[in-house]
Amino acid sequence: METIKIKTPMIQLDQFLKWASILQSGGEIRFLLEENKIFINGNLCTAKRKKLYPGDKVEIKGIGTYLIQGE
């Protein structure tokens, strides 16, 4: 599991994926959502603008697992 630090109290999923260099653009998230590959804290996520907070765990099937950490 990789830890990704954010500088804000929360971050949206699409912004997080760009911030962490997982995707090149926010638009690419659509394909991951359509294929049911994104899980937040163990729950399937279908919202590209899902709010993420420090302590949340993002798992992307076939790519990796990431823990969000605040400053």
Image (spheres, rainbow, N blue to C red):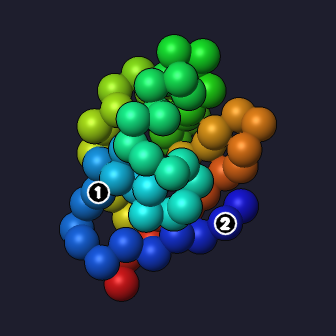
Q: Which mark is residue 1?
A: none
- The residue under label 2 is 2
Q: Nearer the viewer, residue 3 or 28?
A: 28
User: On the rendered structure, is 52 left or right of 38?
Assistant: left
- In the displayed image of the protein, which residue is found farthest to the right? 62
As drawn, 21 above or below 60: below
The image position of residue 30, as x and y in percent, is 45, 25
Q: Amino acid at mark 2?
A: Glu
- The residue under label 1 is 11
Tell me if mark 1 has few (under 14), some (14-19) or many (20+) residues whose alpha carbon lies within 10 angstroms of its own: some
Location of residue 48 (image quadrant): top left
User: On the rendered structure, is 30 left or right of 65?
Assistant: left
The image position of residue 37, as x and y in percent, is 62, 27
Seen at 58% across and 53% down, the residue is: 22
Seen at 29% across and 57% down, the residue is: 11
Location of residue 14 (image quadrant): top left
How many badges with numbers are in the image?
Answer: 2
Q: Secondary structure at mark 1?
A: strand
Q: Secondary structure at mark 2?
A: strand
> Would residue 57 be visible to someone looking at this image?
no
Tell me if mark 2 has few (under 14), some (14-19) or many (20+) residues whose alpha carbon lies within 10 angstroms of its own: few
The C terminus sits in image quarter: bottom left
Q: Amino acid at mark 1?
A: Ile
Seen at 77% across and 37% down, the residue is: 62
Sequence-wise, which precedes: disc 1 or disc 2? 2
As drawn, 69 above or below 33: below
What is the spatial separation of the Cα atoms under label 1 and label 2, in whole angstroms?
17 Å
The image position of residue 54, as x and y in percent, is 38, 64
Seen at 22% across and 68% down, the residue is: 9
